[in-house]
Image (cartoon, grey):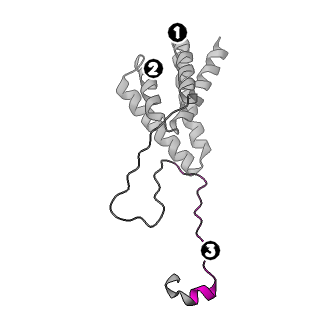
Amino acid sequence: MEAELAALAGSGAATLIGLMVTDSWTQVKERLTRFFASKHAAEDMVRELDISRSEVVAAYEAGNDGMAADVEAQWRLRLRRLLLSDPVTAAELLRLLGALDSELRAPRTNTVRNVVSGGVQFGPVIQSGRISGLAFHTPPAPPLEERATHPEAD
């Protein structure tokens, strides 16, 4: 039984750390706070989750996998102790992890509305939360003989 609880704690900690660096962290944090708040003070949990998230984000940005692993180990130990002290919590944690997994896998639909104002835009206008693999292509310069007849092209 203890091995199963240790595995569940490990899975919970890995999921928690993985979610800390996602766009859905705000919603996830609320659910985690409710889960932990039944065992601890909610304000303390919010503060601890925020500190852990800051550490994990800083670790990933610095390429420091060891630091992120340390934060995960802290949460694994915390979850393991919680599960050992209250076996009913295991069922609650399993339900929470299942719900979070379903939420994260569900397709999200977003509506984007762009408004460009303030004059004429002579270049691309981009609005995005995340851009990957973007490339701008400019038209090739006109041949030299064409440039001689149209000096404004330079």
Local secondary structure at mark 3 = loop
The stretch drawn in magenta includes residue 33: no
The residue range painted magenta reads: 130-148
* x, y percent for residue 63: 60, 49
**Is 25 drawn above or below residue 87 in the view shown?**
below
Which residue type carries mark 2? Phe
Residue 143, position as x, y percentages in the image? 64, 83
Residue under numbered circle 1 = 88
Q: Earlier in the sequence, mark 3 or mark 2?
A: 2
Decide which of tag 3 and tag 1 comes sooner along the chain: 1
Q: Nearer the viewer, residue 46 or 120?
A: 120
Question: In the image, which is nearer the foreground, mark 3 or mark 1?
Answer: 3
Q: Which residue is label 3 attached to?
A: 140
Front label number (3 vs 2): 3
Q: Is residue 74 above or below residue 88?
A: below
Identify the residue at image location x=45%, y=24%. 31
Q: Nearer the viewer, residue 116 or 84?
A: 116
Residue 1's image quarter? top right
Residue at x 52%, y 9% (from the top left corner): 88
Disc 3 marks a residue whose amino acid type is Pro
Q: Mark 2 = which residue?
A: 35
